[in-house]
Amino acid sequence: MTLPRPVKAVVFDMDGLLVDSETVYREAMTLVATERGLEMPPDLFLKLVGLPWASNVPMLMAHYGADFDPESFRVAATSRFYELAKAEIALKSGVVEVLDELDRLTLPRGIATSSRHQDVEHHIGHHGLRDRFHTVVAQGDYARGKPAPDPYLTAAERLGVAPEDCLALEDSHNGVRAAAAAGMMTIMVPDLLEPTAEMHDLCVRIARDLHEVRELLAAQAA
């Protein structure tokens, strides 16, 4: 299978796609919930994946009730996350290889994430990969977070490439919705969330990992 158009730039999500951080976030939030006498059901956490914190709050409030303090929970969960991730967050399989292929093809690339810039510096910077991305779009850089298209539209604008000529790589349902709404060719590389019928409709491909994406880019340019 080939892509519908030549790829002129690639925009990556970060959590769950470039780095194996979603599992650490899940552990941190589960631990903090347990300490407070609460449960963090797996289906609740999966609803939060790929969304900015502001979008998580209504779902947490609906689940835990009016007495739930989302801000103190966020602070505690973030602190626990960094305790768990003190060494470093592991890279997902194929990250370096796909970046090497983009270098060979001289294609610009960026990150569009719901996380903060400091999280990008921690997760990506520790692996020495920050300078391999031409732009990073993170919290504070757009008006509306995923599943709105704003993060991806901002990334395309910064890269100087029309959205329809960009390839977006995502692992979450809300991220796929955001990239597709921006008009980008979208590939889902599943992490914690399985692809649904909606994901198959919105994506040009569901890939097993970033190695498959690298192979697709190489074949497209051949």
Image: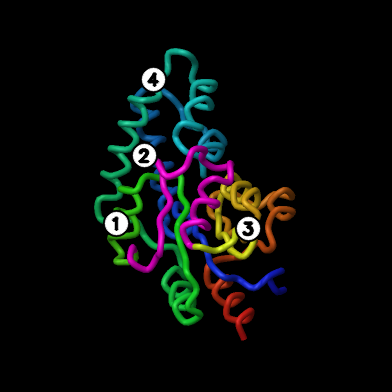
Q: Amino acid at mark 4?
A: Asp
Residue 141 covered by magenta stretch: yes
Q: Residue 27 colored magenta? A: no
How far is the residue under mark 4 from the one under mark 3? 37 Å
Q: Which residue is mark 1?
A: 88
Mark seen at residue 194:
none
Residue beneath disc 4: 69
Discs 3, 1 touching: Cβ within 8 Å: no
Amino acid bearing label 1: Glu
* Amino acid found under the numbered disc labelled 2: Ala
Q: Secondary structure at mark 1?
A: loop
Residue drawn at (54%, 21%) of the image: 62
Q: Amino acid at mark 3?
A: Met
Task: Rate crowding at label 3 as few (under 14), some (14 to 19) or many (20 or more) other CA atoms within 10 Å.
Answer: many
Q: Which residue is mark 3?
A: 184
**If you read the primary sequence from the N terminus, does the residue marked by circle 4 or circle 2 appear first?**
2
Disc with the residue nearer the chain's start (3 vs 1): 1
